[in-house]
Amino acid sequence: MIEPFIIGVSPDNGRSTGGTSISISGTDLGISQDDVVSVTVIAKSCFDINRISSQNIICSTPAGLPNTSGSVIVRTNSGGLSNTNITFIYNPGKYLFYIWLIYYPFHYIVLYYFKQH
């Protein structure tokens, strides 16, 4: 039983809204697609996991809290959990700010809306 070993993650950061496609490189990252049990980023499961080879996995990150970082872990049936200190960082992301100024007889109404982009 050989444990998966992660050498690197590219990119090593992404949006806190999730959906960043990351490429995980290493050794013993599963003997087949079915052998890969899970890939987690900061203890949350990635989705669209695609084992390219025993040395490369591509997946999409889940949503996370802005400005947090944590471990990327691969789990396989054949080798168990990876034991590396490779991390991923969730960026704060960009925010869009909308504002409307509406004149109503004798006063203004201000409406605003924040949206993470």
Image (spheres, grey):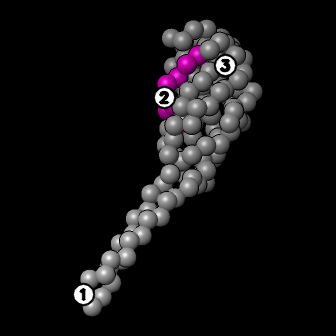
Residue 102: image location, x then y, percent: 32, 77
Frontmost residue, 104 versus 25: 104
**Foreground label between 3 and 1:** 1
Q: Name which of mark 3 and mark 1 comes first in the sequence.
A: 3
In the figure, is residue 115 to the left or right of 39?
left
Which residue bears the numbered disc 3? 56
Q: Position of residue 93 (x, y in %)?
A: 57, 53
Q: Is residue 40 visible?
A: no
Which SS type dominates the magenta stretch?
A: strand
Residue at position x 54%, y 31% in the image:
60
Left or right: residue 37 compared with residue 3: left
What element does badge 2 sit on?
A: strand
Tell me the quarter of the picture where residue 56 sits.
top right
Gap in Å between the C-alphas at discs 2 and 1? 52 Å
| Residue 84 point in image, percent of width and height | 71, 31
State the image quarter where residue 104 is shown: bottom left
Observer-nearest of 106 and 90: 106
Mark 1 Cα shell of 10 Å, populated few (<14), some (14-19), many (≥20): few
Q: Which residue is drawn at 65% across and 27% down?
A: 23
Q: Which amino acid does label 1 sit on?
A: Pro
Residue neighbourhood size for the residue with mark 3, other residues' Cα within 10 Å, grouped as few (<14), some (14–19), many (≥20): many
Q: Indicate whether 23 appears above or below 3.
A: below
* Residue at (69% x, 33% y) in the render: 10
CB atoms of marks 3 and 1 within 8 Å: no
Residue located beneath label 2 in the image: 47
Q: Describe the element under mark 1 as helix, strand or loop.
A: loop
Locate the N terminus by quadrant.
top right
What's the amino acid at mark 3?
Answer: Asn
Q: Name the residue under label 1.
A: 105
Q: Mark 2 vs mark 1: which is more N-terminal?
A: 2
The region drawn magenta spans 43-51
Asked if disc 2 and disc 3 are in contact, CB closer than 8 Å, the reply is no
